[in-house]
Image (cartoon, rainbow, N blue to C red):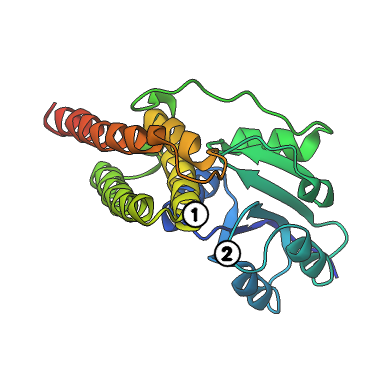
Amino acid sequence: MASDPRTILTIDDDAITRQVLAVVLEEADWEVHAADSGEAALALLHALQPQVVLSDLQMPGLSGEELVRALRSMVPSTTRILAMSATQKASRALEAFDGFLLKPFTAEDLTATLNAAGTQQMEAPANDLNEAVWQKLMASMPQPQVFALYEFALQDAASRVESMQAALTRQDYGTLHAQAHALKGSAGMIGAGTLRALAAAIDDTPATAAIPTSVGEHLRNIVTGISRLRSILLERSIS
């Protein structure tokens, strides 16, 4: 069975990432289908034969090599299965994929990855709001929808900070890393470079007997970064 041309299935447990990917890829004339888990993706494939499957590398439940094996059993041999992550990782799981994209990325990056043998990309420098990502979203969506997306993302970030603060109190590395990883991905997709870099620093914190005090400082800086980004958005909304 042949794959459906210009059809892509995105798999990511983060709602913000799925929404931004849909905007970016639909603007480039992809027909986008989305799943919030590996299990949900497999259910969709009973009625869908995408040309490309784009999956987050680290998700709860079915993910990584196990997910790739299940996907390959259900899609045509011509379907390309790509991994995406907010962090460039040397992971054995990457060997099972046909390519890799570093979040945030553009439709052009996707095309280049599909056409090229290499999978590495340069990571953009951190800043409060990446202008290229902002302009791309403004060109792809009505302005009120862009501001609503950022407000949703900032509320989500604030909620994750609360969860991480509670995890820090409990010395709960699992929750801390899970929340930081999710924030890293969603912040990257909206061009919130500072928030992404701080979340990445927490996500990369190795497990030790006690969580380092630097994590608390990162969390305080994330709160400050959220406030700065809100101020930037407010200025743009009234300009």
Relative to 42, is 212 above or below?
above
Look at the numbered disc 1 and give the secondary structure of its residue.
helix
Horizontal and vertical percent for residue 39? Answer: 63, 74
Residue visible at 69% across and 73% down? 45
Q: Amino acid at mark 1?
A: Ala
Horizontal and vertical percent for residue 122? Answer: 63, 23
- 13 left or right, relative to 85: left
Mark toward the start of the polypeptide (2 vs 1): 2
Residue visible at 45% across and 31% down? 197
Split into 4 quadrants, where in the image is the C terminus?
top left
Crowding near pointer 1: few (<14 within 10 Å), some, many (20+)? some
The furthest residue to the front: 209
Depth check, front residue: 1 or 178: 178
- 87 left or right, relative to 15: right
The answer to whether marks 2 and 1 mark residues whose Cβ atoms lie closer than 8 Å is: yes
Spatial separation of the CA atoms under disc 2 and disc 1: 9 Å
The furthest residue to the right: 77
Residue visible at 33% across and 26% down? 128
- 3 left or right, relative to 200: right
Depth check, front residue: 178 or 214: 214
Residue 178: mark in rendering = 1
Split into 4 quadrants, where in the image is the N terminus?
bottom right
Q: Amino acid at mark 2?
A: Pro
Count of numbered labels shown in the rendering: 2
Depth check, front residue: 43 or 14: 14
Residue position marked by numbered label 2 in the rendering: 60
